[in-house]
Image (cartoon, grey):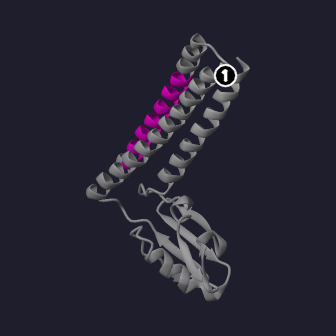
Amino acid sequence: MSELNALTEDLTRRMDGALESLRRDFAGLRSGRASPALLEPVRVEVYGSEVPLTQVGSIAVPEARMLTVQVWDRGAVAAVERAIRDSGLGLNPAADGQIVRVPIPQLTEERRHELARAAARYAEGAKIAVRGVRRDGMDKSKASEKKGDISQDDVKVWSDAIQKLTDQYVKKVDDMLADKDREIKQV
């Protein structure tokens, strides 16, 4: 049974990784509320290379519909402003000294539907990742049976445990998607 515990710990860790990836994907979906995570994927062309926005300034949320980026180097302000504008997020930043203000516009109904579809795609990707982890676990249990390490009865017990774990994680993904849908429609 300790082999089963080790296997389920490994599978749990990997499924948690799929949920964490989904959380990051959802954080990047703009729901009308300002969140520093919205600007984290933005890359800025500065100092002769492309670097993450978080390496040239700090992101803050002074109010519900506004983000600010405190740029540390005055020479990088224009590059930060351009990177945010060209990021495809539909944002229109404005520089004010070393601070770049990024107002978050109100969402249109069409944009809400696009966000909901994107969230569903991300959730489906997470479910596929969870199922891939399940498949690996099932393969390991069958390989252990072939080696003679466990019996057919043990394979059944392992399979049931792996399936139960998978079902729990698929439900967590569904719950996260439902929360994100509510957040998108609520704004």
Q: Secondary structure at mark 1?
A: helix
In terms of depth relative to the viewer, which is nearer, 22 or 9? Answer: 9
Could you tell whether 47 is left or right of 41 in the image? right
Q: Is residue 168 magenta?
A: yes
Q: How many marks?
A: 1
Visible in this render: residue 112?
Answer: yes
Q: Is residue 9 above or below residue 110?
A: above
Q: Is residue 19 above or below residue 48?
A: above
Q: Main secondary structure of the magenta part?
A: helix
The residue lying at 66 percent from left, 34 percent from top is 10
Q: Quadrant of residue 106?
A: bottom left
Stretch of the chain drawn in magenta: 162-184
Q: Quadrant of residue 37?
A: bottom right
Q: Quadrant of the N terminus?
A: top right
Could you tell whether 19 is left or right of 71 in the image? left
Residue ranking furthest to the left: 110
Horizontal and vertical percent for residue 81? 51, 80
Horizontal and vertical percent for residue 127? 45, 39
Residue ranking furthest to the right: 2
The residue lying at 27 percent from left, 55 percent from top is 109
Residue ranking furthest to the top: 153
The residue lying at 38 percent from left, 65 percent from top is 105
In terms of depth relative to the viewer, which is nearer, 50 or 86? Answer: 50
Visible in this render: residue 186?
Answer: no
Label 1 sits on what residue type?
Leu
Horizontal and vertical percent for residue 104? 43, 65
In terms of depth relative to the viewer, which is nearer, 155 or 174? Answer: 155
Q: Is residue 79 above or below residue 16?
A: below
Horizontal and vertical percent for residue 21? 54, 49
Would you name the residue on which mark 1 appears?
4
